Structures are given as structure tokens and as C-alpha cells.
Amino acid sequence: MSPADPALTEAAAARGVATWYSTAGHRRVDIDPDVVRAVVALLEPHAAGAPAPGPPVPLPEAPRTWGWMIQLYGVRSAGSWGVGDFADLAGFARWAASTGAGAVLVNPLHAVAPVEEMPASPYSPSSRRFLNPLYLRVEDLPEYRSADPALRERVDELRPPAADLVEYDGVWRAKRAALELLHAGGREPAGPEPASSEPALRDFAAYTALAEVHGVDWRQWPRELRRPGPAAYGTADPARVAFHVWLQRRCAEQLEAASAAAAGMAVGLVHDLAVGIDPGGADAWTLQDVIARDARVGAPPDAFNQQGQDWGLATWRPDRLAATGYAAYRDLLRGILAHAGGLRVDHVAGLWRLWWIPPGHGAAEGAYVHYDAEAMLGVLVEEAVRAGAVVVGEDLGTVEPVVTSTLRRRNILGSAVLWFTRDDDGAFVPPERWPENAMASISTHDLPTATGFLTGEHVLARAEAGVLGGDVRDEWAAAGKERAALLDLLDAEGLTGPDSTDEDIVLAMHRLLARTPCRILLASPYDVLGETRQPNLPGTTGQYPNWRIPLPLPLEELTTDPRMLRIAELFGSRS
């Protein structure tokens, strides 16, 4: 930004809005003054608020262990209704524990708006404080078990047919109908109505009941309903409010059963905290005084997402969060950690700064807004210590050095991913130089799978979706160079040879991970089982089946597959 506008520079500094940033390649990018001005207009000058947390606390050192990373919707079994559920999570955790695994990282289980059309992305939640009832196992509900044969038969008839992809709308339509039958006809007590001691649950249930009538975006509701209060509570159908309260209680019970199945692990279930929320959803309605609902968060352009990323999410306002003593943030963390042995914080750099995209601008036309990182980290660590949980920060992509150094100082694990663990010249780093203070994996949900990387599926998928940043021939050439660079490293480590097949190379990638000093190693069944499609292709919507790709094997076969057992033996035997 031009230094000729001192008033704008001063206003931006008073609100923590950056006027420039550095890329991963250390190139300075000045932000358009009009963009800075638009972001500044969304904030108030920072002022002293409630006291921040006390002196910094060190988390205890994370155990040296290994485990699995799963997308729960894709872990389907003979018992689930077309989408992996809490019972499948318990079953997978039980199997993983039996092989010596110490952790299971699962995608965010946050509540999306439980109406048609149900959003597919677990990273675009309506509420991060409550759970997605899509994951309920119908047959495990006490209302199903105590139902008379006629009611059970009606419920069983609603089970949807098998499908190649996860069909969220069809599954939710069937499951919701079954849940409504059981709630209306069940013999089990549904629990007390939410009282003054559960205002968050009351508000969430009221929002959801109103959303069924007025649509999922509360900003489009009648004016008198746009805030929680007597008008909204009096308008929401009491029967629907009670239904959604019941759903959340049953979700908590089934998630607790899954957590108990992992209780013998070194860490247990590791939950994933999404970076933001649907600006028209439940949390934005109930917490709107501390939410920046007019800005969308995302990321500036980088090598994998050359047009930048617009996640379409709202997030915390740093000024209002500080003024309220971080109470809403603390409550969120405490609720998630109640059922977790660990927490992965998606885009952990967001505790320092987030890329805000103001109204009317594209993904690349944003600015970084800074938060009080010491306060945000302080609350996070305090709640993790209270719960006895491990914390992992996803610190990939364009991350300031202070993020990595502070995570290390606080004993918060960073993230080490094969595709990103490189020197400045782009060469893959040998395993002994990987960071110890990290959770390591080959890929993530937003990146190519192991086999996808080897076959160039990530180039093909982006080309077909129209999200390549350059000429397709250049992209294929770059992908070929990257494959060759990886094979050079694997060859140098003695892990592959001239006759290695793609399956051999995938195994070699896991052997490479096992040689790193990283405290926690994670394998993905998508990688181990040879799936070429990555779970999510950033920058796409309808062009790609994001969050709908199941594992190639059902749970019953996956747990006996030789490839899965081989990786369990490999990771379990590292010194």
C-alpha cells in the first residue's frame, strides 16, 4: 500500500489490519488500499478488554505414538446408512487400539444445518459447539432398542440404498424420518428440557427449528427473529426444539461411546476444530456480538491454490472477543475437549492472523487481520491442560516463523506433511531433518493422495474442474518433476528401486515417515488402500465430489486388509 495515505495506515494499525504480507517465497505483496479500507470498516479500534489468561502454561510433552487419520463420512460399514457414523468411529477406534495405534484423527464433527440441502463440507459448520446428527447410528438409540416390532420395521424400511458416493441429502432425509419416528414413539425418556443452565443448547435448538421454517440463513429471517430472545423463542415450534435437543443429547452419548472405545490409546480420539463458521448459521446467530459476519475468511494465493481461497466462513472479531474476555472461545474449546484426547486446530496461524475477504471482493483481494495470539493460545492451552489433551496445530502453507516457534515453546505439535516438507529450493527433505515437535502424514484432506500424486490425478482433477492457475502442459510437467524429486529421495534412502510399482512407492512413503523423529505418525486409509481421488479439491464446488468420496473398502474389510495391517506393523515397530 502506498505510504502516501497515513490516515489509512494509522486506522489499519489501530485495528490490527495488515497493509502488506510476505509469501512463502519471501516476496512482499502490498495490499490494495481499497481492500484495506474495506476491512478497516469492519472493525473498531482495539481497546483494553477483560483480563487475558495468566502466565504462559507448557503443555505436557505429547507421547511418541502413531495412528490413523479418517474422514468419518467415508468409513462406511454394513451397519451404517450410507455414511460413516459414531458406531463406525467406535468400531474403527477399537480395531486401531487392538493393533497398538495411539491416536485416531477424525474430521470435524461439527453441526451443519440439519435441513435439506445438507452441506457436505465438515469445515463449513453451522455450529462448532454442537454435533452433526447425520452421524447417529439409528439402531444404537435406546428408543430403537426399546421400540415395538412394528415401529422398528417402519424405521428399518427407511434405510437408503447403497450408493457409490456419500449422498448427504438422501441419507439425511431417510435418517431424519427415522429419528422423528423414534422420538415421537420411543419409550425412553428424552431428558429434561434445556433450562437456564443450558442456554447454548436452547439457542441452537431454537435456531434449527426456525431454520426449518425460514431457511438456514438467519440474516434473511423476519427482523424480529434475527437475534435470540423472547420473539425467537416464542416463534420456534416447541416440538421441533425438543426434537433437536434430543438429537444433540443422543449425539453426545454416541460420541462418548466412541471416545470410550479409544480410551486405552496413548492419545485417543483427536478432534478437528474448523477455522470458522457459516455466517448464516447457528453460531453466527447466537454469538453474533463476537462474530465478524460481514467478512469471509480464506487464504491468499499459493502454489497449490493459485487463485487464493475463499472459504465462505465467518470468524471471531478480535476486538469483541477481547472485550468479552474470550468467554465464547473458551466455552467452544471446553465443549469439544469433553469427548477428546486431542485437538487439531485447523489453520492454527489463525490464532495470530486470518485472511479476511471484505464484501464485494475475490479470494485474492483480502487482508490479514491480527489477533492477540498470546491470549488465544493461553485459553487453548489452559483448556487442553484441564482436559489432559494433546494439541496439534495445522501450520502448513504461508505461516510466519513466530507461529512454528511459539508452538514448539508451548509443546503444541505442528504438522509435517510430505508434500510440504521441502527445502527452499523445493527439494524433499530427508527424514532425519523432519521436525520432532510435529504430527506427520503423507497428505491431508486438501492435498493429493499418495497414489493420486504418483499418477497426476491432482492435475487432471484441477484441469477438469477449471481451477488450474496455469497452462495444463506446464502443470503436467511440474507434476512429473515433483514425482521424480520424490523418487530421488526414496531411492537415496534405499526405499525404492527401478522396478518399484506405485504400491511399492506408497509403502516406501510410509517407511520414510517411520524414519522421521516426529512424535506422532498418522496414516490415511485413502493412501494405504490406493484411492486416487483426494477428499476435497480446494476452489471447487459442484465440479468435484468434495467430501463425498468413501473409502474403497467397507469397515469390515478394511480392518482385515493386508495393506492396512502392514502399515500398522510398520508404524508400530519404529524405535
Image (tube, rainbow, N blue to C red):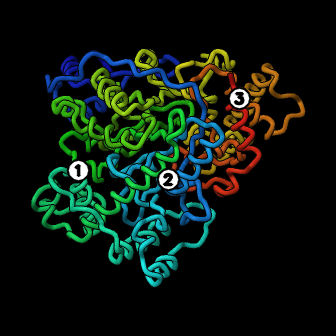
Which mark is in front, 2 or 3? 3
In front of the other: 415 or 331: 331
Say what secondary structure mark 3 lies in: loop
Amino acid under label 3? Ser
In front of the other: 119 or 336: 336
Instruction: Tell me whether circle 1 and circle 2 mark residues in contact (CB < 8 Å).
Output: no
Measure the C-alpha gap from mark 1 to mark 3.
45 Å
Question: Nearer the N terminus, badge 2 or badge 3?
Answer: 2
The residue lying at 51 percent from left, 28 percent from top is 396
In front of the other: 287 or 335: 335
Q: Quadrant of residue 201?
A: bottom left
Which mark is in front, 1 or 2? 1
Residue occupied by mark 2 = 541
- Image quadrant holding the N terminus, namely top left
Residue occupied by mark 3 = 573
- Image quadrant holding the C terminus, namely top right
Q: Position of residue 378 (x, y in %)?
A: 30, 24
Q: Is residue 46 left or right of residue 155?
A: left
Say what secondary structure mark 2 lies in: loop
Question: Given the current orientation, which residue lies at the most extreme left position?
Answer: 230
Q: Mark yes or no: residue 75 visible.
A: yes
Q: Is residue 556 above or below residue 467?
A: below
Measure the C-alpha gap from mark 2 to mark 3.
41 Å
Residue occupied by mark 1 = 200
Say what secondary structure mark 1 lies in: helix
Question: Given the current orientation, which residue lies at the most extreme right position?
Answer: 499
Q: Position of residue 357 (x, y in %)?
A: 34, 37
Q: Mark yes or no: residue 544 visible.
A: no
Q: Quadrant of residue 431?
A: top right
In front of the other: 136 or 83: 136
